[in-house]
Image: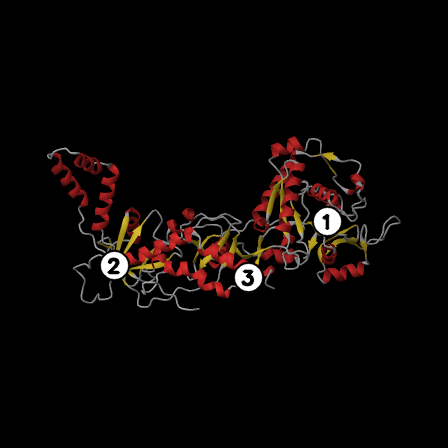
């Protein structure tokens, strides 16, 4: 492209270049559409105006002008007083009126303020009492607003010096880049701190407003900030720093609730991590107990008595007895293989000594201490297998009814597993419909090989739900609905199943009395024709069991639904399952990084 030049021969400005550019580009444009586009773009008046402003500002900056005087307002006042005594002709009256205008006075006032203002950065003067051996002292001035400084201090046990213990990521001190971990604090706003406790210094900082001046001796070695990858964790417990006696600074603590997603900003301290809430726009981090530290604290506490799913008790089961002889034809829909659970009724427990068992159930005696779980965003891709849907809740809460309503609402989308049994097949039964019928020897072999999620024995016959039966449902691109006792959840939480766990809890006992007035329960297999109403004992056991489940296994629940009204609970469950299939959720990172 030929060089551009102006008629006067001087170097063209940006505005002149812009005006000449379309004609210079014309020989190189072949299509009419391109030529029209260039003409319209470079001929835009707003663009020309912006370029003119840019050139004026550049010209102003190159001149570096200085104000002629910084008292234009005072000069205008003197002039007005002087003119008051003169003959009042038209021009003098107009000038006096102009100088008395509030807008003109305001403009002159602003002019004087700008003229007097120095925009060059100024550092505070060095103190006069600096010792000769303190040649490495730094004087730091930070402007404090309503947010905390974002640093904690401690006293060195050996030297007694006040040191910067940690810098909170994203806080004021971190953003300034002037204060570092290990710096020795000598003064705050001219007040020596050598003889003060860290709590007293914190009080001085809290009470200080505006600019705060620090006198510090830099650490011997200032390490570059570590570039840790983003790490997100799901909190599995509630935390309030105000109630934590061990935290070094309660004001620096970050409160959170069970289920909160936290972004870990720093793990430099083995005891206190720095974190912020994942959805918080504030970049400042807060202190939380580290995973190792919190696990140690939990281990020192007396553990709650675990649920004993295997052992018989006085607790009544409201489930159909273990054999599930009757298929369900409600609403004209045959729920093949439909069942509630393998829990025995109270009467059955008296006559059967076999325990309710699950895969590797003995491991639950040493369950992991729930603190944090590393998570990552996950969204089911089109065509991928559905996540396993697991319903958990105390007996009698309505798991069966919710499952039944889901199956009837969309039998092509939802399905249940077909259980296995070692008993003989009856005439009206079909293998793979009511049950998978296998020999007792094969059943015992499968138990030994951990092929069952859960299994039990009733009147000398085995019954159980196999892992393969779950895989069979998922392979058909259906959502598999499974209800289990909560101690089984840990073994289902795998990359293969990615279970979505819904805890169904009962309402208050008062509401149970109102909503379960006409409800009937089957107390045992042989009592199918003699269903009985709920009792006060039943209600109390249901509520107590729910509290114990939530206390011990609540960190594994992704959704909690109170079954106060069955229709409302079903709508809430159905909406939650739709979101699971289409929206992004936080899942354990191990499920996506195998």
2 over 54 or under it: above or below: below
562 over 281 or under it: above or below: above
SS under mark 1: loop
Depth check, front residue: 373 or 271: 373
Q: How packed is label 2: few (under 14 Cα within 10 Å), some, or many (20 or more)?
A: few
- The quarter of the picture where residue 561 lies is top right
Residue 586, label in figure? none
Q: Is residue 371 visible?
A: no
For the residues carrying marks 2 and 3, which lies nearer the camera in this image?
3
SS under mark 2: helix
Q: How packed is label 3: few (under 14 Cα within 10 Å), some, or many (20 or more)?
A: few
Q: Residue furthest front?
A: 7
Residue 413, label in figure? 1
Q: CA distance from mark 2 to mark 3?
A: 44 Å
Q: Which residue is mark 2?
A: 63
* Residue 483 spot, x, y in % from top left: 69, 48
102 over 180 or under it: above or below: above
* Residue 581 spot, x, y in % from top left: 64, 51
* Residue 290 left/right relative to 478: left
Q: Which residue is mark 3?
A: 31
Q: CA distance from mark 2 to mark 1?
A: 76 Å
Which residue sits at x=78%, y=43%?
Answer: 525
Do residues under tags 2 and 1 come within 8 Å of each other at their CB atoms? Answer: no
Q: CA distance from mark 3 to mark 1?
A: 56 Å
Q: Which of the image's four quarters has the N terminus?
A: bottom left
SS under mark 3: loop
Which is more N-terminal, label 1 or label 3?
3
Depth check, front residue: 100 or 452: 100
Which residue sits at x=37%, y=55%?
Answer: 51
For the residues carrying marks 2 and 1, which lies nearer the camera in this image?
2
* Residue 504 left/right relative to 11: right
Which is more N-terminal, label 1 or label 2?
2
């Amino acid at each position: 492209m030929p060089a551009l030049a102006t008629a006067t021969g001087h170097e063209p400005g940006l505005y002149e270049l812009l005006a000449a550019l379309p004609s210079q580009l014309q020989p190189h444009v072949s299509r009419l559409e391109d030529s029209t586009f260039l003409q319209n773009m470079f001929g835009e008046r707003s663009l020309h105006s912006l370029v003119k402003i840019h050139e004026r500002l550049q010209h102003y900056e190159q001149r570096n002008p200085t104000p002629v005087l910084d008292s234009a307002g005072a000069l205008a006042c003197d002039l007005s007083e002087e003119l008051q005594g003169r003959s009042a002709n038209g021009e003098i009256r107009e000038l006096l009126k102009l100088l008395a205008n509030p807008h003109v006075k305001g403009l002159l006032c602003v002019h004087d303020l700008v003229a007097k203002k120095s925009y060059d950065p100024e550092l505070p003067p060095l103190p006069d009492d600096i010792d000769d051996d303190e040649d490495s002292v730094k004087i730091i001035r930070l402007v404090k607003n309503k947010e905390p400084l974002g640093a904690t201090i401690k006293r060195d046990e050996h030297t007694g010096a006040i040191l910067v213990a940690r810098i909170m990521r994203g806080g004021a001190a971190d953003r300034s880049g002037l204060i570092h971990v290990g710096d020795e604090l000598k003064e705050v706003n001219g007040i020596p701190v050598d003889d003060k406790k860290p709590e007293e210094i914190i009080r001085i900082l809290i009470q200080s407003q505006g600019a705060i001046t620090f006198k510090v001796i830099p650490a011997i070695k200032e390490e570059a900030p570590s570039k840790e990858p983003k790490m997100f964790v799901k909190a599995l417990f509630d935390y309030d720093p105000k109630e934590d006696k061990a935290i070094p600074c309660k004001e620096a603590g970050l409160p959170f609730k069970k289920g909160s997603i936290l972004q870990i900003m720093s793990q430099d301290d083995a005891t206190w991590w720095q974190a912020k809430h994942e959805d918080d726009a504030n970049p400042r981090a807060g202190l939380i107990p580290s995973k190792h530290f919190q696990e140690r604290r939990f281990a020192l506490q007396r553990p709650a008595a675990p649920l004993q799913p295997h052992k018989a008790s006085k607790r009544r089961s409201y489930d159909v007895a273990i054999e599930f002889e009757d298929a369900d034809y409600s609403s004209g829909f045959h729920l093949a293989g439909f069942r509630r659970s393998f829990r025995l009724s109270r009467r059955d427990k008296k006559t059967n000594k076999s325990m309710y068992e699950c895969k590797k159930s003995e491991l639950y005696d040493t369950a992991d201490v729930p603190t944090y779980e590393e998570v990552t965003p996950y969204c089911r891709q089109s065509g991928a297998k559905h996540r396993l849907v697991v319903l958990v809740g105390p007996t009698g809460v309505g798991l069966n009814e919710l499952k039944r309503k889901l199956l009837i609402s969309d039998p092509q989308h939802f399905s249940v597993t077909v259980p296995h049994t070692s008993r003989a097949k009856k005439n009206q039964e079909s293998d793979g419909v009511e049950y998978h019928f296998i020999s007792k020897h094969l059943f015992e072999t499968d138990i030994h090989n951990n092929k069952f999620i859960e299994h039990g024995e009733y009147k000398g016959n085995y019954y159980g739900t196999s892992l393969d039966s779950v895989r069979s449902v998922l392979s058909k691109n259906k959502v598999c609905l499974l209800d289990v006792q909560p101690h089984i959840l840990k073994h289902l939480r795998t990359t293969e199943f990615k279970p979505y766990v819904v805890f169904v809890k009962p309402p208050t006992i008062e509401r149970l009395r109102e909503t379960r007035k006409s409800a009937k329960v089957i107390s045992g297999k042989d009592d199918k024709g003699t269903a009985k109403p709920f009792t006060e004992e039943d209600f109390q056991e249901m509520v107590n069991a729910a509290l114990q489940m939530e206390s011990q296994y609540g960190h594994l629940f992704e959704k909690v639904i109170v079954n106060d009204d069955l229709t409302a609970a079903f709508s809430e469950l159905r909406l939650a399952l739709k979101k699971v299939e289409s929206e992004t959720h936080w899942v354990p990172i191990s499920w996506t990084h195998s």
